[in-house]
Amino acid sequence: MNNQIFSPFNNSAHKRCPNDSGHKRFVTGAVVGQDWVVDGAGNFIEVYDECTQVFHKPDTENEWTCADCGAVGVGSA
């Protein structure tokens, strides 16, 4: 696995892996709401619904990691 640092963006702002242009999947952060099952004190028991709302989609300034080879990038081109 190559963990080199790269900018995962080309001029069109689409993410691109520097190791293999065929790699089109990336891991990055998003902020979502979940519904939980809780006890009477509000303590977490389990996730009821994985994603009820997206509060913030992935940002171009996030760290983006190629899901296929692990190359890591930050920011935009």
Image (cartoon, helix red, strand yellow):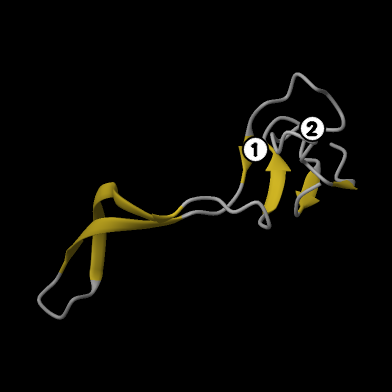
Return the residue found at the far top.
22
> 1 left or right of 56?
right
Residue 2's place in the image compared with 47, above or below, is: above
- Count every numbered label the image shows and give the total: 2
Quarter of the image with the N terminus is top right
> 69 left or right of 40?
right
Rounded to the nearest whole Å, what is the CA distance between mark 1 and mark 2?
9 Å
x, y percent for residue 7: 83, 46
The residue under the point 75% across, 18% down is 22
Return the residue found at the far bottom.
41
The residue under the point 73% across, 33% down is 12
The residue under the point 32% across, 58% down is 33
- Dot 1 alpha-carbon crowd within 10 angstroms: few under 14, some 14 to 19, many 20 or more: some
Can you tell which mark lies on residue 17? 2
- Dot 2 alpha-carbon crowd within 10 angstroms: few under 14, some 14 to 19, many 20 or more: many
The residue under the point 79% across, 32% down is 17
**Mark 1 or mark 2: whose residue is earlier in sequence:** 2
Which residue carries the number 1 mark? 26
Please state which amino acid type lies under the numbered disc 2. Cys
x, y percent for residue 23: 73, 24
x, y percent for residue 2: 88, 39
Secondary element type, mark 1: strand
Among the 4 quarters of the image, the one containing residue 55: bottom left
